[in-house]
Amino acid sequence: MSPSSVFNPDRELLVIGVVYTVLTIIVFPIYILIIHALHSRKDLRENISYKLINLMNYCDVSQAFCHFLTGLFLIFPIFTTKVDFFVRIVGCTANTLWLATFVIMAVLASTRIGIAFFKLKATKWTIWMIIALAIGSIYIFLVWAIGCITQNFQLTGPNWSYDMEVKFASVFAELELVLCFPTLVLSFCSYILIIYSTYKASL
């Protein structure tokens, strides 16, 4: 087999694959340093907000690994032809980790509002935080498990997307919108409220 037949004949996809791979290699040590910093300081390690932030960091670095594999899939298209089931599992895993960050963001935003306005302790878990994370974790696990079993995620060019030919894929795509947009609004509002509270306290 000649080298030219191993690498992607599409020059654009080949370049994108190399960029994916190189960028993720650069990102890994940065995330390791951030995660280590949040773990090593006791005041940060015990703070609920920073625990949630570090949980997001774990999701992000795991996503980065999936993007590293995506780069390899683009460089060597033989993966998508010979082990497409594995490629789809990687895509489903990356998407699920991305969704998990929205669940964490929602809990983090609510936690910050609770600390700023309802005098919640920054180092103590409340029952609603635990319940919210538990429900979110169950939802994320089900999305991942069903996605892996039904193979509902595919690599089309440089992009990951739901395979709409798979049963219920459109339902999961719509559920993402239901989860993502309210979470972004909640997170944005929490920052605005906290900034307003800080400004008001300084007057």
Image (tube, rainbow, N blue to C red):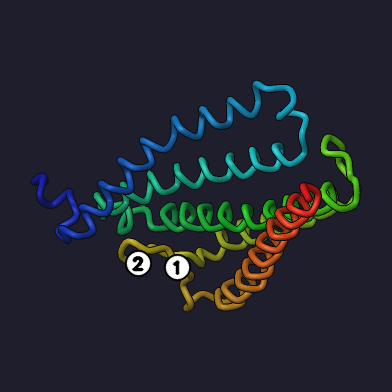
Residue 26, compared with residue 199, is above or below; it is above
* Depth check, front residue: 135 or 102: 102
Residue 153 placement (x, y as % from top left)? 48, 64
Please tell me how crowded label 2 is: few (under 14), some (14-19), or many (20+) other residues with Cα within 10 Å. Answer: few
Dot label at residue 156: 2
- Residue appearing at x 53%, y 53% in the figure: 93
Residue 120 drawn at (x, y percent): 89, 45
Tag of residue 133: none
Q: Secondary structure at mark 1?
A: strand
Please name the residue that numbered disc 1 is placed on.
161
Query: Does 31 sit left or right of 180 as displayed?
Result: left
Q: Hey, which quadrant is residue 48 in on the image?
A: top right
Furthest toward the front, the residue is: 203
Q: Mark 2 is on which residue type? A: Thr
Q: Is residue 52 above or below residue 33?
A: below
Number of marks drawn: 2
Residue 192 quadrant: bottom right
The residue that appears at 73% across and 52% down in the rendered structure is 199
User: Can residue 133 be seen in this snapshot?
Assistant: no
The residue lying toward the viewer, choosing from 104 and 70, is 104
1 or 2: tag closer to the N-terminus: 2
Residue displayed at 87% across by 37% down: 124
Judge left or right: residue 195 versus residue 123.
left
Confirm or deny contact between disc 1 and disc 2 (CB under 8 A): yes
Choose between 85 and 130: the one closer to the eye: 130
Rendered location of residue 59, percent (x, y): 58, 45
Q: Is residue 194 left or right of residue 24?
A: right
Residue 31 visible in the shown view: yes
Gap in angstroms between the C-alphas marked 1 and 2:
7 Å
Query: In the rendering, at what x and y percent does residue 13 appear?
Result: 23, 58
The kind of residue on which mark 1 rests is Ser
Q: Secondary structure at mark 2?
A: strand
